[in-house]
């Protein structure tokens, strides 16, 4: 067994086990964990300083998950957009390929919490084959995003097999991997893994840091290995109430990401996922954070703030708006609030 697999085995999955580290209400946690599983890796557990802190909120079950029954289980209508169980095909040229049903640490705000880590998401070899066949049969797909669950929880040999099969599909121009293991299980990023990933170029990897305290030396080392394998690294952050809904924390996170060669890509507005309503913020909070960033951090650090619209309607970027055209004039404002006007082109 590899070291990362031992770490997974040593992860916390029961309230009793968590109670060995922190004072928790075992009965309450049990009720939540029966519906929405818990797993916290030793690395991620080690980042918790005290109950209720931003790391704790992301990984420790909360009774509010069960109280939330208003929001839809599948806000993005992924099930309806699944031609085969392992593929979500919403945009013509891109497809999500769900190759793994489990994660190293289960995020309490996960948009797929209806099924991630549950029996409903046990991915079989048959599902993976059916997904590859679907992608091979649909030449309009140019870009496949391996997701799940976490694709990097798949053993190396199987991952290599999937990447090789995808590599033989002539119309596929690139593969992306979405993974949180650099944050939650950095020991997974082994030399062997990097060697097999670099054979799958052009390969892009998006990881998922939400708080500056996740930028540990171990995570930095994992990202350095991936970057040294020539893999462009991006980051998707979810805007989370009580975790990162603050301009200074966000700025620290985004600057820290650039320092470890990870380019911020998306800041996701929280989806309307059942069981995760307590993480939602007003849209205005996200817009204000972006306002505060513009002009104060390097442009390279600024992600696109996006809302994945309910009903599977796709992602749209959200403000702040700086520029308006009013007839013959362009009216802009600076991040400092100053108005600037200039003439619009009249003949084009
Ligand atoms: C987000 C998403 C993608 C990828 O979108 P990009 O904007 O290209 O990163 C593809 N398919 C689905 C279903 C998605 O939700
Ligand atoms: S790593 Fe991603 S898929 Fe897994 S629980 Fe977290 S948000 Fe969900």
Image: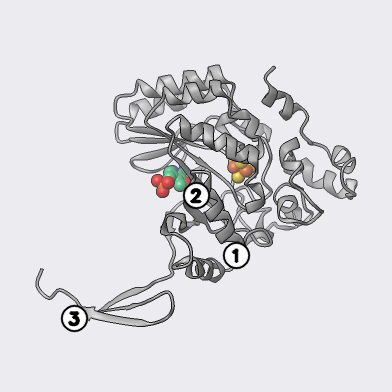
Closer mark to the observer between disc 3 and disc 1: 1
Q: Earlier in the sequence, mark 1 or mark 2?
A: 1
Question: What is the CA distance from the residue labelled 3 to the residue labelled 1?
Answer: 39 Å
Quadrant into which the C terminus falls: bottom left
Q: Is residue 111 above or below residue 270?
A: above
**Left or right: 260 as drawn, with respect to 46:** left
Q: Secondary structure at mark 3?
A: loop
Residue tagged 2: 258
Residue 134 quadrant: top left
Residue 86 percent coordinates (x, y)? 51, 32
Residue tagged 1: 248
Q: Secondary structure at mark 2?
A: helix
Badge 1: few (under 14), some or many (20 or more) residues near its Cα, within 10 Å? few
Are the two marked residues, 1 and 2, in contact with CB atoms closer than 8 angstroms? Answer: no
Q: Earlier in the sequence, mark 3 or mark 1?
A: 1
Q: Residue at x 75, y 51 (%)?
A: 56
Q: Is residue 86 visible?
A: no
Counting every numbered tag in the picture gives 3
Badge 3: few (under 14), some or many (20 or more) residues near its Cα, within 10 Å? few
Closer mark to the observer between disc 3 and disc 2: 2
**Left or right: 159 as drawn, with respect to 198:** right
Residue 253 percent coordinates (x, y)? 58, 55
Q: Is residue 108 above or below residue 132?
A: below
Q: Is residue 258 visible?
A: yes
Residue tagged 3: 328
Q: Is label 2's Cβ within 8 Å of ligand 1?
A: no
């Amino acid at each position: 067994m590899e070291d990362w697999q031992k770490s997974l085995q040593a992860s916390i999955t029961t309230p009793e086990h968590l109670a060995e580290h922190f004072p928790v209400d075992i009965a309450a946690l049990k009720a939540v964990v029966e519906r929405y599983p818990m797993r916290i890796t030793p690395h991620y557990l080690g980042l918790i300083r005290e109950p209720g802190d931003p790391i704790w909120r992301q990984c420790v079950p909360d009774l509010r998950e069960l109280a939330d029954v208003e929001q839809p289980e599948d806000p993005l209508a992924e099930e309806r957009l699944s031609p085969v169980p392992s593929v979500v095909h919403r945009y013509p040229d891109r497809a999500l390929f769900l190759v793994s049903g489990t994660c190293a640490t289960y995020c309490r705000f996960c948009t797929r919490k209806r099924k991630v880590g549950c029996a409903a998401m046990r991915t079989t070899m048959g599902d993976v084959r059916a997904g590859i066949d679907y992608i091979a049969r649909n030449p309009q797909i140019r870009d496949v995003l391996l997701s799940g669950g976490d694709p990097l929880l798949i053993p190396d040999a199987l991952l290599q097999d999937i990447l090789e099969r995808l590599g033989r599909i002539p119309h596929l121009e690139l593969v992306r991997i979405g993974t949180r293991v650099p944050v939650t299980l950095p020991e997974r990023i082994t030399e062997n893994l990097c060697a097999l990933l670099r054979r799958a170029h052009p390969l892009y990897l998006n990881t998922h840091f939400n708080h500056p305290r996740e930028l540990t030396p171990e995570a930095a080392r994992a990202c350095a290995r991936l970057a040294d394998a020539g893999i462009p690294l991006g980051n998707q952050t979810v805007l989370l109430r009580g975790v990162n809904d603050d301009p200074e924390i966000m700025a620290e996170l985004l600057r820290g990401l650039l320092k470890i060669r990870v380019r911020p890509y998306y800041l996701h507005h929280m989806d309307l996922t059942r069981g995760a309503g307590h993480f939602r913020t007003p849209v205005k909070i996200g817009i204000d954070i972006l306002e505060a960033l513009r002009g104060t951090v390097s442009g390279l650090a600024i992600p696109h703030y996006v809302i994945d619209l309910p009903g599977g309607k796709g992602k749209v970027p959200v403000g702040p708006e700086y520029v308006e055209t009013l007839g013959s004039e362009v009216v802009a404002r600076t991040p400092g609030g100053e108005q600037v006007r200039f003439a619009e082109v009249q003949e084009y």
